[in-house]
Image: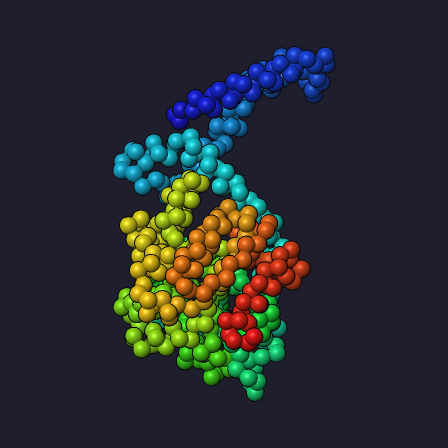
Amino acid sequence: MVPIPKFAKLFIQITSLAITKYIDTLPLTFECLNGHWTKDAILYTTYNQPGLKYHVSLPVAAGALLVGLPYSISLVAQWMYGWPNKPGYKKYIEALKPRRIYCLTRAVLETLKYLQYGKLYFQWKSWYKNAENHKHYEKGIIFGRRGNKLDLYYSHTVGRSGAAAAPLVVFIYGGAWGSGQRSIYCLLARQMAEELRATVICPDYCTYPKGNVLAMVQDIADCLIWAQKSAQKFNFDKDNIVLIGHSAGAHLCALMTLFLIDAREELFIEASKQQEITLAIKGVIGLSGVYNIMDHYEHEQMRAVEYVSTMHKAMNGVENFPYYSPAHLLKNFSQDKLKSVPPFVLLHGTTDIIVPVESSMRFSELLTSLAVKVSLYLLPGVDHTEIVTDLMAWDRRFYHAVYSCIKQEHMKLIGAC
């Protein structure tokens, strides 16, 4: 049996006492279907049915709500997504700690706000399945060593046959390194192609558990190799590429760019090809990105989600956090390599509780200290989800605010102003 924490018992007792004192002030009785409810019945109620008798007290009801529910929610979450990384029975002791129970329950309940995007969900589902919309994009193009697929979106004013080659935007979605698919972002990619007057590619990449972060970086690099080979066919400028990523996608954009500059052998891409792609990347735009993995892990610990999170698993353990941290890589770059780092544009909502705004602020400070060009936009009232979902339709609350920043910086990056 799970022991009830002392502070929870105390809270229940105080709550029960307060309600008792309040009810004692009531001069009324309360009617129910089977008779009268007295003041005592509110605190200690017996329900009589043929062959059944239920005896419920307020402390028990309060305990079920304040203890039973949080423990149930958090234990189910840990059972589904991962127990604490402790040996033997100690993982269960860690899992049952009151702070972890209540913090994790809060994090789970916060996901209920995603229900507000139900209408948007049906919109993109319908749009993506509608064959008439295929004139706006090429769907399901196979690329790379793992046979992933990408979608390519046109702007109606540029990039078509006979027109000048359009600049290329590669959008990398997030999903905590463990989820996501390109079809979800069809409305975003469509709007982005129009707003930026560019060709937009949205590729899938292997997420955990199908692959680790290195495999994800390889997949995104493979997408850029495909772009180098396919530019003429789809009439976009292979030497004028801007990467845009959200959350984990922003991390992967930054990490892949730095891996290419560092000519990493583990990418299994020829050094000359890596250099060619590096020169083609004119900038990286990160939306609510993670750039220092250890800092973000500490934030996950504060929210008690570090064990259910995919992050440490996708990176093969805490010991690999420096290897996968763009901030750590930059600190070890030589001056020559720092000169090859493209400009960064960082956008972050000030009400983001998933990836705190300090993530972009600290990365901006680091880039500035290393003489790398960077622009930082802090967006008041924007949370972690809105910064990307509100790019999907022009009538969304923050659509114009976010796109005004992206459009202005995108024009600078591609040399259009």
What is the total number of numbered labels drawn onto the structure image?
A: 0
204 shown above or below 175? below
Look at the image and tell me whether residue 110 can be seen.
yes
Locate the C terminus and report the quarter of the image it occupies.
bottom right
Q: Residue furthest bottom?
A: 162
Colour setting:
rainbow
Q: Is residue 79 or residue 333 the one in the foreground?
A: 333
Q: Horizontal and vertical percent for residue 230?
A: 44, 80
Q: Residue at x 34, y 31 (%)?
A: 93
Q: Is residue 236 or residue 32 the one in the foreground?
A: 236
Locate the N terminus and report the quarter of the image it occupies.
top left
384 shown above or below 10? below
Look at the image and tell me whether residue 126 can be seen.
no
Q: Horizontal and vertical percent for residue 124?
A: 58, 62
Place residue 194 in its image quadrant.
bottom right
164 shown above or below 116? below
Q: Is residue 99 or residue 43 the one in the foreground?
A: 99
Give the side of residue 401 with respect to residue 65, left or right. Answer: right
Q: Horizontal and vertical percent for residue 71?
A: 45, 32
Place residue 54 in its image quadrant.
top right
Q: Residue at x 44, y 78 (%)?
A: 239
Q: Residue at x 43, y 32 (%)?
A: 99
Q: Residue at x 44, y 40 (%)?
A: 303
Give the side of residue 314 with respect to residue 18, left or right. Answer: left
